[in-house]
Amino acid sequence: MVSPSGPSADQSSMPAPERRLRRAMSARHLVMIALGGVIGSGLFLSSGYTIHQAGPLGAVLAYLLGAFVVWLVMLCLGELAVVWPVSGSIHIYAARTMGPATGFATAWLYWLCWVVALGSEFTASGILMQRWFPNVEVWVWCVVFAAVLFTLNAISARVFGETEFWFALIKVVAILGLIVLGTMAIFGFTPLSTTHHEAVGLSNFVTPDGLLPAGLGGVLITSLAVFYAFSGAELVGVAAGETKDPARNIPRALRSTVLRLLVLFVGSIVVIAALLPYEKAGLSSSPFVDVFEYVGVPYAADIMNFVVITALLSVGNSGLYSCARMLFSLSEEGYAPRVFTKLTRRGIPMVALLVSLAIGLVSLISSVIAAETVYLVLVSIAGFAAVAVWMAIVAAQYFHRRAFVREGGDVSTLAFRTPLYPLVPILAFVLLTASIVAIAFDPNQVAALYYGIPFVGLCYLFFWWRYGRRGVAPSRRDEEAPVG
């Protein structure tokens, strides 16, 4: 492990370009990285089930609530990411404001969340590829996709950002296509279809059981899954250390991300809910396929199969990037082996990247040979982490601003400041806490509490045993990151 004394002499003598991550990404890259991490199978495959559970209007309300919570979290993240524009910064925020043990637990929660996602994305992509190549085993595709994502991450941060931009763009175009063509179909205009469809308007929103057939309870239970569907937006903060002009580009990226998520997610849900009977939505196929076939798009199933594979690989690409930066950041702080700080000449934490990919593949193997034990624990902790990390972000902003003002700081000097403080972080924390509590009443998700809370407790106990209450000495980050 890294000693409390900080960087070793041999590290200090290295040329700066070799031991620093490179600021090579723009606001355009940040937005698409965030969208890439968010838009996945949850929207393309599971949105119909959400409509089925909560009803048309209930699903729209659940996604609006999810977008509102994302907006609150992003407002808090913006202030922190500009103050500390460092790689893997989510746990840095928690460590600087709530103590190193909290930062340590946050980092490992977030790392494990994405490592588990890697295995599931590879598996799902391999299964979908069998539509076109039924004789090729799923594990072969898993290896191929793992090699592709490793290569994209290993070249440079700019190459990663550029490929993620195009990955995400494919998904965005598919969603916009659904929104545009679906809106036309709502009013009875389907030029691509050989079948004439009457205008349906919003008639599907009025169900035989009323506007909210599952009641407000159905909306609240569904909103839990929606929160998870939006997780990944915080990748803007993870990439802060490799962003050009962070004071300018991070706030721009955060605003663009929230606005685009609102339009893409809520817009597509409104269209799907308006065109598909809610009691049948998404039970046998992707609601995107159903809508595209409804409006007459040729080869709709094949097109969406390609889009969903792209979406899965995009999420995996962002996840692998996030895992590597989190290990690199932990190592720089002194809470992971020093070898994870080693960078290539292009500024890539190669060892951290290799280890993250390897553990992701172990997660994949455990999903096959230990699905009811090891993999269940990993997935449960990952689900818990999605909301817990957001709670750490908003709590960190609250404590940072309070300490900044207490020490005589002038809030007007902050390059980006969370508005309506302290209302925004408090409201966000309350809503996120409510979602965690509500998990206890959902038998399909309660395992997240059974394993997630003990995992956090073990992280704290290990930290106090290994490093003591105060942790190791502050790292170079305190000298590099502008505060205030």
Image (cartoon, rainbow, N blue to C red):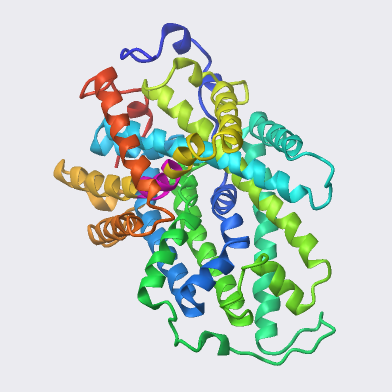
Q: Residue furthest top?
A: 9
The answer to whether residue 327 is magenta is: no
Indicate whether 62 appears above or below 332: below
Residue sitting nearer the eye, 401 or 176: 176
Residue 332 spot, x, y in % from top left: 41, 23
Residue at 51% over, 20% down: 19
The C terminus - image quarter: top left
Indicate whether 464 appears above or below 375: above
Residue 239 spot, x, y in % from top left: 50, 40
Residue at 37% over, 68% down: 220
Q: Is residue 34 left or right of residue 211?
A: right
Q: Is residue 258 left or right of residue 195?
A: left
Region rendered in magenta: 381-390
Indicate whether 406 appears above or below 183: above
Q: How many marks?
A: 0
Residue 208 spot, x, y in % from top left: 50, 89
Residue sitting nearer the eye, 39 or 161: 39
The N terminus - image quarter: top left
Residue sitting nearer the eye, 226 or 247: 226
- The answer to whether residue 161 of the structure is visible from this angle is no
